């Protein structure tokens, strides 16, 4: 049995048929070829599958695809493009924050969310940034350069 759902995906209206037990992460990867979000723990512990849904981020490995019906979803592929990286993506590149890259799509989605949530308030400190990213695990970056990248975006956007 499959269920038809309709939702907005990276600013585009889409519809798809999915099995009731399919996760949002699997749907994005298998039905839409959006492979930025990764399956790592599959238990909501690592953040490698982070996407934005409506106005918050979620671990897409824990959400059923059918629950996307009527929602607005953004993946890393909708944040920027290879030809035009979004400012957070570019900052991760510029600051050497990306190593193997496996966790980075989720990390960048969460970083973008944390900074956007703070708009109009005092700039985030490095501790604030680290706290905001504590649900995103990286085995090879050591986090320092990740925080460097996000802090640079905070400074850059505060100057705009
Ligand atoms: Fe979803 Fe780890 S794969 S939180």
Image: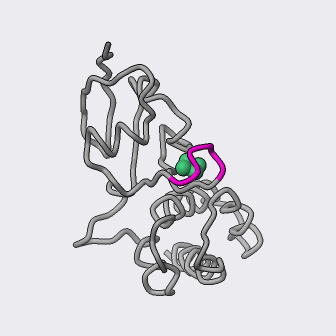
Tell which of 21 and 69 is nearer to you. 21
Placement of 2 over or under 158, stated as above or below: above
- What residue is rendered at 29% in x and 43% in y? 11
Q: Residue at x 48, y 28 (%)?
A: 64
Stretch in magenta? 40-45
Magenta span main SS: loop
Residue 86 at x, y percent in the picture: 37, 68
- Determine whether 89 is above or below 50 in the image: below
When the figure is inspected, residue 85 is found, relative to residue 52, above or below; the finding is below
Magenta stretch encompasses residue 56: no
Q: Relative to 45, does residue 129 appear above or below in the rendering? A: below
Indicate the quadrant containing the N terminus: top left, top right, bottom left or bottom right.
Answer: top left
Q: Residue at x 48, y 37 (%)?
A: 54
Q: Position of residue 80 (x, y in %)?
A: 32, 63
Write the residue at 41% across / 19% down. 20
Q: Nearer the viewer, residue 95 or 125?
A: 95
Residue 7 drawn at (x, y percent): 33, 29
Left or right: 44 as drawn, with respect to 28 = right
Q: Position of residue 148 (x, y in %)?
A: 61, 82
Q: Nearer the viewer, residue 160 or 28?
A: 28
* Circle count: 0
Relative horizontal placement of residue 72, taking residue 131 as reference (left or right): left
The image quarter containing residue 150 is bottom right
**48 left or right of 35 in image:** right
Residue 43 inside the magenta-drawn segment? yes
- Give the image quarter of residue 154: bottom right
Left or right: 149 as drawn, with respect to 4: right
């Amino acid at each position: 049995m499959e269920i038809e759902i309709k939702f907005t995906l990276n600013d585009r209206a889409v519809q798809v048929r999915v099995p009731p037990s399919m996760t949002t992460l699997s749907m994005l990867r298998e039905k839409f070829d959006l492979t930025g979000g990764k399956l790592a723990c599959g238990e909501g512990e690592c953040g490698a599958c982070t996407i934005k849904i409506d106005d918050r981020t979620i671990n897409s490995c824990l959400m059923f695809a059918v629950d996307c019906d009527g929602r607005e979803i953004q993946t890393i592929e909708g944040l920027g493009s290879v030809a035009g990286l979004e400012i957070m993506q570019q900052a991760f590149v510029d600051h050497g924050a990306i190593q193997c890259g496996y966790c980075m799509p989720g990390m960048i989605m969460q970083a973008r969310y944390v900074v956007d949530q703070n708009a109009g308030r005092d700039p985030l400190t490095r501790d604030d940034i680290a706290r905001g990213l504590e649900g995103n695990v990286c085995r090879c970056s050591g986090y320092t350069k990740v925080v460097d990248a996000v802090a640079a975006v905070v400074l850059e956007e505060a100057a705009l």
